[in-house]
Image (cartoon, rainbow, N blue to C red):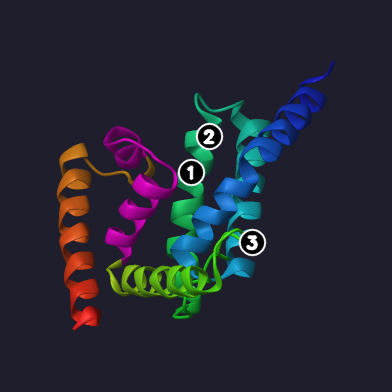
Amino acid sequence: MSIEALSAEALSALFQEHARTLVRTAVLLTSDEGLAEEVVQEAFLGLHRRWQHKGPPDSPEAYLRTSVVNGCRSALRRRKVAAEARVPQPVPNESAESAVLLHEEHGEVLAAVNRLSGRQREVLVLRFFLDLDDQAIAAALSVSRSTVSSTISRALRSLEDLLEGEAR
């Protein structure tokens, strides 16, 4: 099997395994599903180019995560996206009242997350959506672990303040 066929096969497997999660991550960072899909496609194209010229990275998943976060930052700068994040659909087994409350709570939390700074939003999405540890977040954002810890702490305090302000 040629190197090109092997890389295409490996890239296809990576896409099947990680694309959906990366798109969801990018949606949380950009609040725009179409933009999120573009960012993820560009990340996979970048990985393909890198693979062809330099071989596979040590951790293709980490390479893709970092590419998606950086791509979201660039896209937000270029397009100045300010739209609200899409609210996840409630679980259908719930009563109508609990579904409405869940929908409202998700909307309030996502709106509050969207009011955080870009860096704070990034660390919260990487921690709580992708369930990454401080080391993996630090690698994805190219910052130190202590920066990740302090940013998460500040982000959670800010989020709490924003949500308490809405409750009043």
User: Toward which corner of the image does residue 48 lie, by quadrant?
Assistant: top right
Residue ID for mark 3 = 38
Magenta stretch, overall SS: helix
Residue ID for mark 1 = 65
Task: Choose the circle earlier in sequence order: 3 or 1.
Answer: 3
Identify the amino acid type marked 1: Arg
- 163 inside magenta stretch: no
Marks 3 and 2: CB-CB under 8 Å? Answer: no
Of 102 and 166, nearer the camera is 102
Reply above or below: 99 against 156: below
Question: Is the residue marked by circle 2 packed among few (<14), some (14-19), or many (20+) residues within 10 Å?
Answer: some
Q: Position of residue 20 (x, y in %)?
A: 63, 48
Marks 2 and 1: CB-CB under 8 Å? Answer: yes
- 131 inside magenta stretch: yes
User: In this image, 124 relative to 145: left or right?
Assistant: right
Question: Is the residue marked by circle 1 packed among few (<14), some (14-19), or many (20+) residues within 10 Å?
Answer: many
Specify the segment rendered in magenta: 118-139
Identify the amino acid type marked 2: Glu
Judged from this view, the residue extending furthest toward the right is 1
How many labels, in total? 3
Q: Position of residue 65 (x, y in %)?
A: 48, 43
Task: Choose the circle earlier in sequence order: 3 or 2.
Answer: 3
Judged from this view, the residue extending furthest toward the bottom is 168
Residue ID for mark 2 = 61
What secondary structure is found at the residue carrying circle 1?
helix
User: Toward which corner of the image does residue 101 lie, by quadrant?
Assistant: bottom left
Of 66 and 106, nearer the camera is 106
Residue at left offset 35%, top offset 35%: 136
Identify the amino acid type marked 3: Glu
